[in-house]
Image: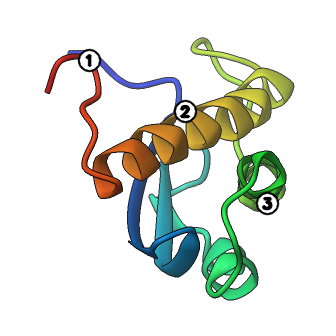
Amino acid sequence: MDIAVAGAGVSITLDNEVIKSIHVALASVAPTPILVKKITEELTGTNLSPETLNHAGELAKEAATPITDMRGTIEYRKHLSDVLTKRALADAIKRAQGGKVNGR
């Protein structure tokens, strides 16, 4: 059986460069999967920018409440919450703008 160290999923709707809706879910960084409501609250209605991705990553990191176990430390999993959120958000933005990610 494979168990993830951490995971992030993003749903985003854009109107040009404005975020109309955004939802970020994290897995394996809390007792159950979590929806990072602060990202929805703080980023809906804002313009896309590099700071947007960084802020989303920081909010995800703050929302994560992992434990240390054989798959990773608290610090490592919080770091992954930040990194994976930014990666998933960047991919979701590309797709929302009609682009492809990894050839798809």
Mark 2: few/some/many CA within 10 Å (<14, 14-19, 20+): some
Residue, disc 2: 87
Foreground label between 1 and 3:
1
The residue type indicated by label 2 comes to: Arg
Sequence order check, earlier mark of 3 and 2: 3
How far apart are the alpha carbons under marks 3 and 2? 14 Å
Give the labeled residue for mark 1: 102
Compared to residue 33, the image places residue 75 above or below, namely above
Instruction: Tell whether 3 sits left or right of 45.
Output: left
Q: Which of the 4 image quarters holds residue 19? A: bottom right
Q: Position of residue 7 (x, y in %)?
A: 46, 37
Q: Which residue is mark 3?
A: 59
- Indicate the secondary structure of the residue bearing disc 2: helix
Task: Name the element at disc 3.
Answer: helix
Tag nearer the camera, 3 or 2:
2
Helix, strand or loop under label 1: loop
Q: Quadrant of residue 71?
A: top right
In this view of the protein, can residue 28 be seen by the observer? Answer: no
> Which residue appears at 74% of the width and 54% of the height?
49
